[in-house]
Amino acid sequence: MEKEAKFWKGEDRKIRCLLCPHRCLLAEGQRGLCGVRENKGGKLYTLIYASCSSAYPDPIEKKPLFHFYPGSVVFSLGTVGCNFKCLHCQNYTISQVKPENYPLAEILPEEAVERAKKCCEGIAFTYNEPTIWFEYAYDVAREAKKKGLYTVFVTNGYINEEPLNEISRYLDAANIDVKSMSNEFYKHICKGSVEPVLEACKMYKKRGVHIELTYLVIPTKNDDAEEIKNFCRWVIEELGEMQPIHFTAFYPQYKMLSLPPTPFKKLMEAYAIAKKEGLYYVYLGNVAHGDYENTYCHNCGKLLIERYGFSAKIVGLDGRKCSKCGEEIPVVI
Ligand code: SF4
């Protein structure tokens, strides 16, 4: 469904979209790189307001968010389109398709919140990039907060400051992909750039949004020990040593079929680097080794949250404190 978009201005008889760092300049009838925002008659329209490709209850652990309402269920909404063109996209069937070529279901904000209230504790905008769904995500998130639900973005972090500020008012948590520390990687593999993503991580955190970072380890592309070390050092310097991070395994997808899956040894190397650099809450994902998904107290080592697959059981928390040593744990519950 179409709706006039936010964040744009007229420029040289064209429209400049100001939602994400691409800042697309669109002539009449032209769409942005995300494929879902179009200049129609001198105004910018979103083509996907309330248009959903998926709406399912999911465990919050699947996002992944491990320090945010562990064990809760989140109503997860997705649409189509993306402002990145990642060659390894796991969800390319929705992220790289035009709205007119996909059977989208209309779910208005009030209905989305009503449906979420029946089975879930929160609403997540996920599966494809929520930034480009801004107008709808904002309306749903505002409505959700009125009804006592939490709200989540699973995002690539490619968003400009003004929209980030607006959505942060109604956003409780975000899992942000940091895909690499290299601009070359972002440029050639994603059609983006790294700096705005790192800035968005800092800005979301500063505005009180709980964040967790995911780094998908891709053989030969971003798995170099030096790059992993750079990432960890940046996290500690900018976000602190308590910042939860997830290293996840790559599986060949979409246009990146010639690479092998990430060997477990490589993930362990990343884990060891992160721990050595001083990060406390480091997790491994997309692998069957449960021990790297559990949460342990950074002070005394007690098991706090036990995970198996996407299920989570709180076993060592008194509120937000470790039940053994009383240390405050960076967890939202
Ligand atoms: S949101 Fe879409 S149209 Fe707007 S700048 Fe980003 S890619 Fe371009």
Image (cartoon, rainbow, N blue to C red):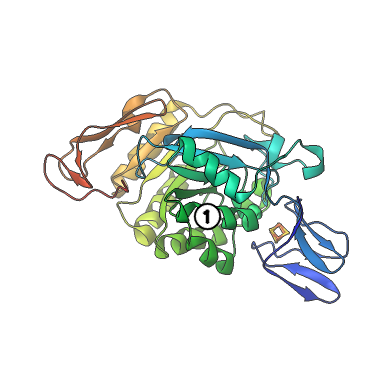
Q: Nearer the viewer, residue 52 or 228?
A: 52
Q: Residue furthest top?
A: 288
Residue 188 lies, with reference to residue 71, above or below; the image says below
SS at mark 1 in the image: helix
Between 320 and 104, the one lying in front of the other is 104
Q: Position of residue 6 (x, y in %)?
A: 68, 66
Residue named by callout 1: 143
Relative height, residue 128 to residue 139 (above, below): above
User: Quick check: 78 left or right of 30?
Assistant: left
Residue 81: % across, % down: 70, 46
The amino acid type of the residue labelled 1 equals Glu
Find residue 54 and report its horizontal and vertical position in percent. Answer: 63, 36
Q: Residues within 10 Å of mark 1 (few under 14, many from 20)?
A: some
Residue 306 occupies quadrant: top left
Q: Is residue 65 visible in this depiction of the protein?
A: yes
Q: Is residue 83 left or right of residue 28?
A: left
Left/right placement of residue 154 relative to residue 41 reads: left
Rendering coords of residue 7 (x, y %): 67, 68
Give whichever of 284, 4 is nearer the camera.
Answer: 4
State the image quarter where residue 235 is shown: bottom left
Instruction: Note whether 99 is above or below 15 in the view shown.
Output: above
Quarter holding ligand 1: bottom right
Q: Quadrant of residue 162?
A: bottom right
Residue reaching furthest bottom?
12
